[in-house]
Every structure is written in C-alpha cells, then in structure tokens.
Amino acid sequence: MNNEPVPPLLTVTGGTLVIADRTPRTPRPRGPYGRLFTAPGSLAFTLTGALGRLPVSMLGVATVVMVATLRGSYALAGAVSAAGLISAAVSLPFVGRLVDRHGQAKVAVPAAAASTAGAVALLLCAHCGAPDWTLFAGCALSSVRPSLGAMTRARWAELYRDDPAARHVANSVEQVIDELCFMAGPVLAIVLCTALFPEAGLLVSTVLFAAGTFLFAAQRRTEPPPARLTPSTPARWPVPGLAARESPARRRRPGMAGVLAAFCCTGAVFGSMEVVTVAEVQRLGHGSTAGLILALQAGGSCVAGLAYGTLRPSGPARRRYVLCTAAMAALLVPLTMRTAWEHWPRCSSSWGWPRRRRWSPV
C-alpha cells in the first residue's frame, strides 16, 4: 500500500486560489449496534420479529376489555385470560421442541395459523353471544403460538456463533425490544378498545401477529438449521438453553434447577410490577401519574439494556448473572421502603415486639 502523501489540488476560482486536500478520509468506526446489523438479513428478521411480538403484549388486555365490555363480567374476562396464559405456558415448550427438530418456518407458520384461527373464533364468539365455554376454547387455541423472541435469539446465536461480543450486544437489543413491546402493547390495546369498538384491540393484535410471524418465517436466509440432538451430542449453539430442550439429560444438568427457580422468581416480579405499582400509586392519591411511572420503569429498563450492550463482558457468565441478579434485588428494595415503614408499627405490635416508650416528665 502506498503511504506517500497525496499532493493537494490547486485551482483558481474568480481570482481566488483554492487548495483542496485530496488525502483519503478514514471511515469512522461503527459502534457495537451499528456493526451488529451489518450481517445480511439481520435487520429484516429483527423488525419482523418485533412486529410479531407486539401483539402478544396486547392479547391479554384486549381479551379482558372485550369480554368485560360485551359480557359485563370482569370475573369471566379474567378467567378467560387466565385460560389463555395457562395454555401458553403448557404449549410453548412443545412448540419450541418442534422448532428445534424441524426448523422455524415449518413450525411457526402452522402454529401461527392455528393461533390466528383461535383468536378469530374468540372474537366471533364474544361478538355473537356464544356460550361462555366457547370463549375459553378460543382463547386457549389462540395462545398456542410460536415464541418469536426465542426464535429471534436463536438466529442471532447462529449468525454470530463465533463472536461472543456480538451475541452480547444482540441480547441487549432483544431485551430493549421486549421492553418496548410490552410497554406499548397494553396501551395500544386499551386505546383501540375504548376509542373504536370492544373487539378492535383483539382484531388488530391478531392481524399484526399473523403478519409479523409470516414475514419472519419468510426470512429463510438467516434461519438456523434444525438440530436433532441426543444426550451425548454437544450443544451447537454457545448460548445455554437454546438447544437444551431436546435432551432430558440436559435438563437435569447441574445448575439448571437453580436457573429455572431464579427465572420463576424474576418472572413473578415482572408480572406483578405493573399491578402493584398502579395499586400503590392510587393508594397514595396519585392515580393520574401511574402511566408516567410505568413509562419511567420501562424506559429505565430500555436505557439499562442499551448501556449494558455497549459494555465488554468480562469474566464467566455465571458471575455476571449472579451480580446482575443481586443488583436487581437491591434496586427493588427502595420501592418497598415507604410501605414497610408505614406498616412497621402494626407488624411489630402483632408480633409481640415491645415498643419503645416515650419519655415523659410526668
């Protein structure tokens, strides 16, 4: 490569000497997020996966509002929504196993079609006044869907199999997308159900889910190959849990039970955070600020995810997992301090602890 300096270009314009520097400019290096999407097809499956994940956060709220408005019973609406959650919890591991065996497109398309049919049946049954049991059946079928979040992460893991730093950034991107979807989804569902008609939220979420899933499955260039694993087969993906669903022996490996228990606890925290926050804010007499506080929580999570993605991971993943879990637990403590301080005298009295007597001169 010739490193000799390039002479400037001299020219005269209107009696003025112009000197133009012809030295080649070094391109500005891209940041970690800019380099992440340089892989062909990465932006396409990320956007389509986000489009299909947004309706998942809309489904629960849209179902509750629709059933409660059309049938006049929040108890029935909550029971129907709970049936959908149970169906999703039972069916998702089986759908994930089929995805590992046969590939994403071959399983995601039929599963999305069945889920769409169930959502349409639920909408029609609620609108036409069908018996209550049909609502449970439709909601249960609509919850048999593929996990677009897991399939998107599997594509990142396969795309950057030999680049741990890129996988670290990709996981941060997925965390931010999840937060944005679950922040915007319920709000969008409530706005549609209240501003248009009760079935609007479920109708829009069904259309978006079907479109996002089918477009995601059409991205065949970045689809990871199927994996047929046996207990003695080493894991293809260097991300714990992506290929472990296939082998019972892997589910019994040391440490897996602890990880599952920890994620059950963190899931309980995330699942109750919105309800507890709204209830506590209303108890304090600031109900109008509940939406702002929830938005701040989600926004803080997005900023933390983006900031964590820019860091270079050091040390074993087990240590980072323990440190991050401990930090989350420590940051949750201030949220409970006010309530704990208010109820401390009552609790200490019920437990029989002696109260400190105030000094009196009399």
Image (cartoon, rainbow, N blue to C red):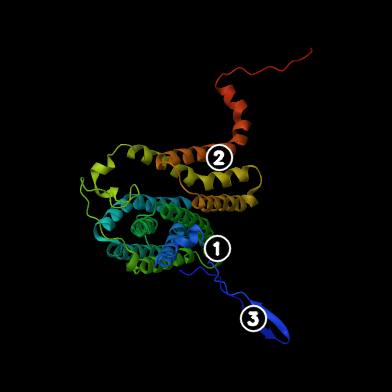
Place of residue 315 in the rendered image (x, y in percent of width and height, measured from the top left): 43, 41
Q: Examine the image and state in which quarter residue 256 appears.
A: top left
Residue picked out by circle 1: 191
Residue picked out by circle 2: 331
In the picture as drawn, the residue positioned furthest to the bottom comes out as 14
Residue type at mark 2: give it.
Leu
In the image, is residue 200 above or below residue 67?
A: below
Nearest the camera: 289 or 6?
6
- Give the crowd class for mark 2: few <14, some 14-19, many >=20 residues within 10 Å: few
Residue picked out by circle 3: 10
- Mark 1 and mark 2 residues within 8 Å of each other at the beta carbon: no
Q: CA distance from mark 3 to mark 1?
A: 64 Å
Nearest the camera: 89 or 68?
89
How many numbered dots are placed on residues in this image? 3
As drawn, is 216 to the left or to the right of 360?
A: left
First reached walking from the N terminus: tag 3 or tag 1 = 3
In the image, is residue 231 above or below residue 111?
A: above
